[in-house]
Image: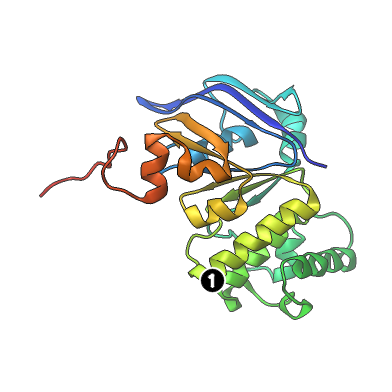
Amino acid sequence: MSADITLAGVRKQFGRKVVLDGVDLTVAAGESMVIIGGSGTGKSVMIKCILGLIRPDAGSIRVDGVETVGLRGKALAAHQSRFGMLFQGGALFDSLPVWRNIAFALAGNAASRRAAAIDNLARVGLGADVADLRPSELSGGMQKRVALARAIAARPEILFFDEPTTGLDPIMADVINDLIRTLVTDLKITALTITHDMASARKIADRVAMLYQGRIVWHGPRGDLDTSGNAFVDQFVHGRADGPIKMPVRTL
């Protein structure tokens, strides 16, 4: 089962710094939405607001039509249990073996949780021989796969991916992109990915939205990225220094 997400007029400010300045975005149930944009544009803050880790200063965030801004206690915990998360650095627990990392949030006895962990390892192309290893014994690509297995272990309705290919070589990055695309499709999960990796966006997305200076400046089907007619998107997609996006550079 998947869920839809709707943001309307979401604002968040830290001191004088306006991070989100009226974000409007809809992610359909079962859709893979990719948010692109440079560092510091508010992508991670937006995800934290959806999760309920940060409360927006204004606006509405609805999941399956239910308002989530302001949830507390058990209602907030129930809301957060609907999500899985692949963190940028993997965020595996170094002190736990792989299978306990994957089964960390699962209920049941050790035997059933270990079996579930091995099943999820298989979904990301890893064998049972990895289950008792420590994260430090794995390559970066294997760590990312284990983190992905943990993200899907509880069969969440919504998956968040935070820069899923950071730190990976191009081949392993493409492997991870393929895995994400396959898992989202097979498990019928709503996915929201934040990235600046355009190869990732092109592989994972059904639709793409660009966040710039706290607002969604464009959104559309993945196939329209190269013909968006939007100067911000065009500059970002093609990695051009010249354009409406100005990077602050201190001169010597």
**Residue pictured at 52% horizontal, 21% vertical:** 57
Q: Residues within 10 Å of mark 1 (few under 14, many from 20)?
A: few
Q: Position of residue 10 (x, y in %)?
A: 54, 23
- Residue extending furthest toward the left: 252
158 relative position to 168: left or right: right
**Quadrant of the rendered structure where residue 111 is?**
bottom right
- Residue extending furthest toward the bottom: 129
Judging by the rendered image, the residue that carries numbered circle 1 is: 171
35 relative position to 85: left or right: left
Is 215 drawn above or below residue 2 in the view shown? above
Q: Amino acid at mark 1?
A: Ile
98 relative position to 204: left or right: right
- Residue extending furthest toward the front: 227
Which quarter shows the N terminus? Answer: top right
The scheme the figure's colours follow is rainbow
Observer-nearest residue: 171 or 194? 171
Is residue 92 at least partly visible in the picture?
A: no
Kindly state the secondary structure of the residue where label 1 is placed.
helix
Is 227 drawn above or below residue 97 in the view shown? above
Observer-nearest residue: 67 or 30? 30
Q: Position of residue 95 (x, y in %)?
A: 63, 68
Q: Position of residue 243 (x, y in %)?
A: 29, 39
**Quadrant of the rendered structure where residue 179 is?**
bottom right
Is 15 drawn above or below residue 132 in the view shown? above
Is residue 211 at least partly visible in the picture?
A: yes
**Residue pictured at 73% horizontal, 77% vertical:** 132
Is 95 drawn above or below residue 206 in the view shown? below
**Residue pictured at 49% horizontal, 60% vertical:** 166
Q: How many marks?
A: 1
Q: Position of residue 38 (x, y in %)?
A: 40, 44
